């Protein structure tokens, strides 16, 4: 199997693990194996029932992901790839090790909320590194930016996507905190208790989470408008439109999650849409520095500079 296909498989498995982790949290099965790691209730293979089955399944998926990730890293080392792909491969391995250690700490310390939030953020960064490897695996050398009058525009577009990624990471961090502290219902749709402004710490945290979601949705919609107005690359426009649709779906699922009193199904779909949105934005950011984007850019510049046939 090629690095590209193996990386794609790892991306998909990471997505499944993140979403299933949301099910573990929503079903309150995080301690289904007791405060033990790597054993589960003192056994390598425990009795399969209830919360134990859910938590053990999550651990099995994580173990399979870990093995495939190590195979991917070994393949990167043995294959001729660009220095940037090799460097991201090392980062991928580092993030995997940190993720495993944080997962063990979550269990051993009885689900500390702050560690759970960091655990989810690291999972997203790990997913982003895998997406980078998947999209850039076939590039044999680092890409040199073609000199052009569009280089400033390219940097500005990259800056926009960097901001979106940071907002998403903050959104996931606060979302995990809200989830595991059971703060989802502390405020209503338009007010907290009898006030339109949050007054307590928990109310402020939940309001920040909602505010980040609102700002993110507006920002992505603004980027769609900007891309059409400024005539950005068509593939970027399509990715932005798909991201805008996804963020609107995620916001809608967030509303349904609250109105359903944190129903597990809606909560999982909310996380699934958010993770998909992060993956879409991360893939677009990687595309902006890829050979495919730069070749398209060079082609546009070449055609623009060609003399008009009627003038020859």
Image: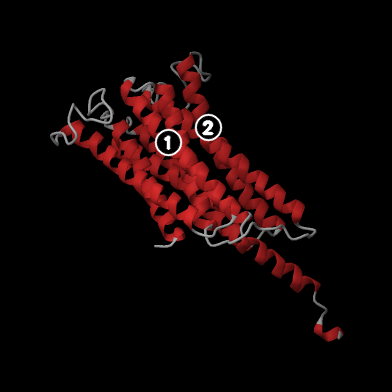
> Which residue carries the number 1 mark?
97
Residue at image position (59%, 47%) is 221
Mark 1 lies on a secondary structure that is helix
Q: Quadrant of residue 120?
A: top left
Q: Position of residue 291 (x, y in %)?
A: 62, 62
Q: Residue at x 46, y 29 (%)?
A: 118
Q: Vertical placement of 183 versus 86: above or below?
A: above
Quarter of the N terminus within the rendering: bottom left
Which is more foreground, mark 1 or mark 2? 1
Left or right of 235, for residue 130: left
How many neighbours does mark 2 have within 10 angstroms: few (below 14), some (14-19), or many (20 or more)?
A: some
User: What numbered label is drawn on residue 131?
Assistant: none
For marks 1 and 2 on the same chain, the one whose residue lies earlier in the sequence: 1
Furthest-top residue in this view: 200
Q: What residue sits right under mark 2 in the picture?
A: 170
Q: Which of the two residues, 74 or 236, is positioned nearer the viewer here?
A: 74
Visible residue check, residue 297? yes
Q: Quadrant of the C terminus?
A: bottom right
Residue 35: image x %, image y %? 26, 22
Q: Is residue 235 above or below residue 187?
A: below
147 left or right of 193 in image: right
Whole-angstrom CA distance, mark 1 to mark 2, is 22 Å
Asked whether the viewer can see residue 247, the reply is no
Q: Quadrant of residue 146?
A: bottom right
């Amino acid at each position: 199997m090629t690095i590209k296909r193996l990386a794609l498989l790892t991306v998909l498995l990471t997505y499944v693990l993140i979403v299933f982790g949301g099910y573990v949290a929503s079903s309150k099965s995080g301690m289904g194996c007791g405060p033990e790691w790597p054993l589960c209730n003192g056994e390598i293979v425990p009795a399969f029932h209830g919360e134990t089955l859910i938590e053990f399944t999550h651990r099995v998926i994580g173990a399979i992901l870990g093995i495939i990730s190590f195979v991917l890293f070994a393949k990167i080392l043995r294959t001729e790839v660009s220095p940037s792909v090799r460097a991201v491969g090392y980062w991928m391995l580092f993030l995997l090790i940190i993720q495993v250690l944080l997962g063990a700490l979550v269990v051993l310390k009885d689900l500390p909320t702050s560690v759970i939030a960091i655990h989810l953020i690291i999972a997203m960064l790990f997913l982003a590194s895998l997406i980078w490897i998947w999209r850039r695996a076939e590039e044999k050398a680092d890409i040199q930016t073609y000199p052009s009058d569009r280089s400033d525009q390219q940097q500005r577009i990259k800056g926009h996507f960097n901001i979106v990624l940071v907002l998403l990471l903050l959104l996931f961090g606060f979302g995990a905190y809200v989830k595991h502290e059971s703060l989802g219902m502390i405020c209503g749709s338009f007010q907290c208790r009898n006030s339109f402004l949050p007054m307590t710490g928990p109310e402020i945290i939940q309001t920040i989470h909602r505010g980040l979601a609102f700002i993110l949705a507006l920002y992505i919609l603004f980027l769609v408008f900007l891309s059409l107005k400024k005539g950005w690359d068509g593939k970027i426009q399509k990715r932005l439109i798909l991201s805008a649709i996804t963020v609107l779906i995620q916001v809608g699922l967030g509303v349904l999650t609250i109105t359903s009193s944190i129903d597990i199904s809606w909560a999982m779909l909310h996380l699934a849409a958010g993770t998909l949105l992060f993956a879409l934005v991360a893939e677009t950011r990687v595309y902006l520095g890829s050979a495919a984007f730069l070749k398209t850019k060079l082609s546009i510049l070449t055609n623009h500079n060609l003399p008009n046939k009627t003038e020859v």
